[in-house]
Image (cartoon, rainbow, N blue to C red):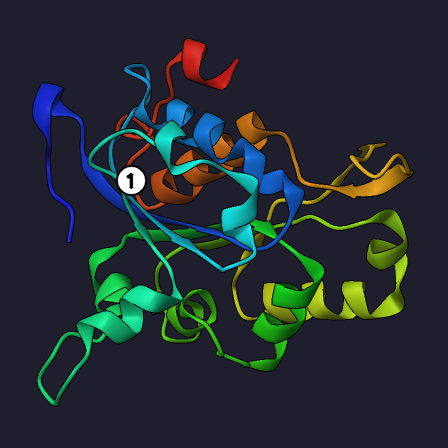
């Protein structure tokens, strides 16, 4: 669990999950915001990615010291009874879990309890007393399918926090809703989710971090 870090900032452990959406290209920017000196918390970050998510970022763009886990790591760590179970240990370690982006396929899995990869296993084992944030991202036609609203409402009914999609011109060239929220919006939701359990004085966010 987290504790107080340097400069009197509380230390918070956070998992960033990424599924197979092109919006994963924004992962380095989200990390940059979290590690900014103006952030009210000292974040320790671990990343969990699906195999498809790896297509959309270069590990060289991730700061040194931040661990990136995928399906292979789960099986490499466990050889016999008593060995670490990665998706359980990650959940015990973290104070907050954010999946950004959550693509249509992973949303369907998450809302029905399917856990066939490290990301979904970590989500299924998550302690619901701690913040869980999801940031949908998909093509407009996929987002407009009626199953999407049904799945989002189910997740929110479990206490998960949605950072809603925005409307813009997507990478595929279509224009409409379905794009992942701006990184600054996701950052602010992370801060707000953690600060909601603190006193108003302790949860104050510097103007430069919330602008």
Above or below for 197 versus 205: below
**Residue 194 percent across, percent down from the top left:** 35, 42
**Residue 67 percent across, percent down from the top left:** 26, 46
Residue 151 in sight: yes
Q: Nearer the viewer, residue 112 or 170?
A: 170
**Residue 94 percent across, percent down from the top left:** 26, 55
Q: Nearer the viewer, residue 145 or 40?
A: 145
Q: Which residue is mark 1?
A: 198
**How many discs appear?**
1
Q: Is residue 169 left or right of residue 30?
A: right
Which residue is farthest top? 208
Residue 87 in sight: no
The quarter of the image holding the N terminus is: bottom left
Above or below for 173 versus 20: above
Q: Residues within 10 Å of mark 1 (few under 14, many from 20)?
A: few
**Residue 11 percent across, percent down from the top left:** 18, 37
Residue, x 56% and y 30% (percent of image)? 183
Residue, x 55% and y 81% (percent of image)? 114
Image-quadrant location for residue 153: bottom right
Above or below for 33 versus 155: above
Badge 1 element: loop
Q: Is residue 83 left or right of residue 171?
A: left
Which residue is farthest bottom? 81
Residue, x 40% and y 68% (percent of image)? 118
Residue, x 15% and y 47% (percent of image)? 2
Q: Is residue 167 left or right of residue 205?
A: right
């Amino acid at each position: 669990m987290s504790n107080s870090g340097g400069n009197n900032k509380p230390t918070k452990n956070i998992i960033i999950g990424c599924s197979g959406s092109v919006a994963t290209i924004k992962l380095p920017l989200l990390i940059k915001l979290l590690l900014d000196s103006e952030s009210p918390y000292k974040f320790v970050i671990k990343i969990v990615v699906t195999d498809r998510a790896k297509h959309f970022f270069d590990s060289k763009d991730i700061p040194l010291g931040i661990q990136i886990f995928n399906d292979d790591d789960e099986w490499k760590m466990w050889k016999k009874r008593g060995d670490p179970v990665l998706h359980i240990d990650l959940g015990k370690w973290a104070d907050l879990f954010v999946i950004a982006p959550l693509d249509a396929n992973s949303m369907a899995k998450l809302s029905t309890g399917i856990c066939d990869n490290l990301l979904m296993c970590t989500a299924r084992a998550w302690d619901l007393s701690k913040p869980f944030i999801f940031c949908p991202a998909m093509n407009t036609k996929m987002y407009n399918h009626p199953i999407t609203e049904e799945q989002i409402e189910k997740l929110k009914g479990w206490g998960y926090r949605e950072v809603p999609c925005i409307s813009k011109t997507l990478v595929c060239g279509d224009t409409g809703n379905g794009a992942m929220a701006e990184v600054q919006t996701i950052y602010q939701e992370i801060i707000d989710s953690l600060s909601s359990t603190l006193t108003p004085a302790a949860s104050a966010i510097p103007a430069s971090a919330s602008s």
